[in-house]
Image (cartoon, coloured by chain):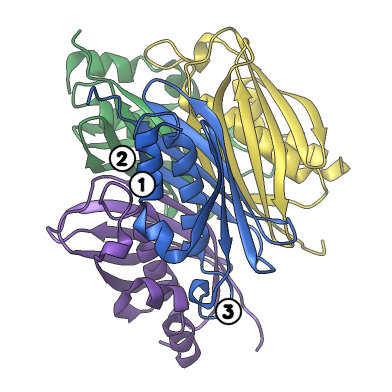
Chain colours: A green, B yellow, C blue, D purple
Amino acid sequence: MDKDMIRFVRNDEFARFIGLQLVTVEPGYAVVRMEVKPHHLNGVGSVQGGAIFTLADYAFAAACNSGGNATLGINANISYFRIPKGRVLTAEAREVSTTNRLCTYSVDVFDEDNVLIARLTATGYIKRDKS
Amino acid sequence: MDKDMIRFVRNDEFARFIGLQLVTVEPGYAVVRMEVKPHHLNGVGSVQGGAIFTLADYAFAAACNSGGNATLGINANISYFRIPKGRVLTAEAREVSTTNRLCTYSVDVFDEDNVLIARLTATGYIKRDKS
Amino acid sequence: MDKDMIRFVRNDEFARFIGLQLVTVEPGYAVVRMEVKPHHLNGVGSVQGGAIFTLADYAFAAACNSGGNATLGINANISYFRIPKGRVLTAEAREVSTTNRLCTYSVDVFDEDNVLIARLTATGYIKRDKS
Amino acid sequence: MDKDMIRFVRNDEFARFIGLQLVTVEPGYAVVRMEVKPHHLNGVGSVQGGAIFTLADYAFAAACNSGGNATLGINANISYFRIPKGRVLTAEAREVSTTNRLCTYSVDVFDEDNVLIARLTATGYIKRDKS
């Protein structure tokens, strides 16, 4: 991954604050892991939807920024399938399409039993600045 | 708002952890506020997309659960329009449609200058259990 | 509306083929109407989801292209609320946000009883070519 | 595929009207084909977004209704990646998740060069009537 992009992704304070761990980052691919803690839960004791979204979205950001161009998220669509079980969630982001200005990624989120609990489809705008 | 639902919404640990404040909750309507702190920022110093999503999604959860039936989020679609300015974000959730089993809400997110910076459209599945 | 854009919108063969009628077109706003015919129905006799989508998407295209720049649809999210009643559907598109390169519109679809039966949120990429 | 469901899918008047051909239908999987005709084009001579959506959505409907329960589309999110080339479009629908009441499918749309030009993610509500 491009060095500036590493910094960009690693310096994400919100990802650090909620406890996301980058496992793998390659151009067009990333895996992020989250150990479920009490602060991730909603009022009925499940992992909160925003925490699941943030996990998946961070995998998208890592994967699409790893190519060396800053990418701005413009749209994200998440479907929740099941209440996750266990103490670890894993998000795996894969490139679906990249054109000159736009990229789309699909991110699958699995629980500790390796059951698919959510899928995010995210679209980014690629900034191709001279700098 | 129904008492059990108040508990459900107020006991959201993730919302508390990242610093969301319920301002208004009525059946079909809610306003949530977030003071921007360093832990909300991404690697380029803007509010992270996951924090904006969580703010909007919590307004949706508060509004749709306030009627007394537990609602499960099944799908959410967010569009980001602008980098927010200032130190406060506000999310305002409004009911778009509610049928027997499904509800859809639209949530607008404004920055401190009252500029629309994102919109979430979220669909929930209404659990109508006897319990 | 810019003359070239009028041509672009009016020359839409698919819109003509399925029977869409432009009622109003202004920069950032459009209304499109569809008289329900047997060829719009699905296997259970309701208006097919693709026909509802096309109606709403055409209102989006008319509204966002009326400013004089060609806009390419990049993402569209539709929620269906109710089975429409009556013999006419109307789609009303409103601008939500326009920045340099991207625009987002919200399109409400009403049946003959003026009941909201679907909502489309669509994002376009604005081509700002010299030509 | 269940006989009633065959009828339901095959009697889709809108799919017939615009020229969609069911190629494969199995529980959880379907392929639909569309030969591009002048009536599918938009004002700049490309296949109209509504035609692409309808093709993909019909593959979703065929795949998710083939199990024997009627499914109602509640949400669909489409991303367009490229202007299709050639005279044939093919949509391939795959099940992502099915629970008691909800199912989600991913549908890829390819052009004649086998390039991925769009992806639809669709969610349906499964009617489990006694009848």
Q: Which quadrant is home to the N terminus of chain D?
A: bottom left
Element on which disc 1 rests: strand
Q: Amino acid at mark 1?
A: Ser
Residue position marked by numbered label 3 in the rendering: C45
Query: Residue D14 or D105: which is nearer the viewer?
Result: D14
Mark 1–mark 2 CB contact (< 8 Å): yes
Residue position marked by numbered label 1 in the rendering: D79
- The local crowd at label 1, few if under 14, some if 14 to 19, many if 20 or more residues have their Cα within 10 Å, is many
Q: Amino acid at mark 3?
A: Gly
Q: Residue at x 64, y 51 (%)?
A: B124
Residue B29 image position (x, y, % from top left): 77, 36
Element on which disc 2 rests: strand
Q: Residue at x 46, y 63 (%)?
A: C50
Horizontally, residue B65 falls left or right of residue D98, namely: right
Hey, which residue is sitting farthest front in the picture? C3
Q: Which quadrant is home to the C terminus of chain D?
A: bottom right
Residue B112 image position (x, y, % from top left): 63, 11
